Image (spheres, rainbow, N blue to C red):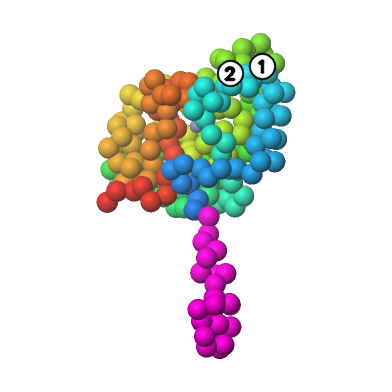
Amino acid sequence: MRFIRNPALAILASFMAPAAFAAPAVLCPATPPPQPAAYVAHIRDVNRSLGIPPDYTARHHLVPQPEAKDLVQVPRDVYGRKVEMVAPAAAALKKMFAAAARDGVKLETVSGFRSMAYQTHLVRKKLERGMSIEKALAINAVPGYSEHQTGCAADLTTPGVPAADSSFAKSKAFGWLERNASRFGFHLSFPPGNQYGYEYEPWHWRYIAGSSRP
Ligand SMILES: [Zn+2]
């Protein structure tokens, strides 16, 4: 502020500066920003308690994801349960559902935001049923690393297809998404042979801010 000679202007600038520099955090960026050390340590402790090998996430190119705070509702899931996403993702999803409907395609939600605690519960349940940790992590994301906890991702289906089922890839709805989802900023996260070690998930779509094409 030294360069402002006029005292009145300097005072004005001192009021304006915080607003000008405090850029709001972008929700749903292509790459999540580094997460606070205490949060990363918490994730590590939780995953150690599940028996996840310490090098698992690095081997699978996974990065810690922020947990969404402010959520809004999107269409209820196929079981009638409330589904939530962060506002920009929710708005894009609603637009996409409406556009699909105009083309005679009915899209439905299966899942949106999931907290890290709930994700931990999902993995723990599988382990308690006797599933190996490797198999469980091919189905459920590592807690702390799930796109669902950002509130930017949704699992989708269409009438006649079971939730989170590979047959969704053969549906008319999936064909529509392949052609149109990117117009709304939604992208398939886990194609066949993805680097993260997850099974092919044709139902899992993630909203990325600023990525929608006209
Ligand atoms: Zn998913």
Q: Residues within 10 Å of mark 2 (few under 14, many from 20)?
A: some
Was residue 203 drawn as part of the magenta stretch in this picture? no
The one of 3 and 102 positioned closer to us in this rendering: 3
> In the image, what residue occupies the spot 51% across and 69% down?
20
The one of 160 and 188 positioned closer to us in this rendering: 188
Q: Can you identify the residue that label 2 sits on?
A: 136
**Residue 88, can we see it?**
yes
Q: Is residue 115 above or below residue 162?
A: below
Q: Are marks 2 and 1 in contact (CB under 8 Å)?
A: yes
Q: Can you identify the residue that label 1 sits on?
A: 127
Marks 2/1: CA–CA distance: 7 Å
The spot of residue 5 in percent (x, y) is 52, 85
> In the image, what residue occupies the spot 59% across and 52% down?
70
Q: Which circle's residue, 2 or 1, is located before the other in the chain?
A: 1
**Quadrant housing residue 133:** top right
**Quadrant housing residue 13:** bottom right
Q: Residues within 10 Å of mark 1 (few under 14, many from 20)?
A: some
Secondary element type, mark 2: helix
Q: Amino acid at mark 1?
A: Leu
Range of magenta residues: 1-25
Q: Is residue 210 above or below residue 120?
A: below
The spot of residue 125 in percent (x, y) is 67, 21
Q: Is label 1's Cβ within 8 Å of ligand 1?
A: no
> In the image, what residue occupies the spot 63% across and 19% down?
53
Classified by dominant secondary structure, the portion drawn in magenta counts as helix
Q: Amino acid at mark 2?
A: Ala
The spot of residue 48 in percent (x, y) is 69, 23
Secondary element type, mark 1: helix
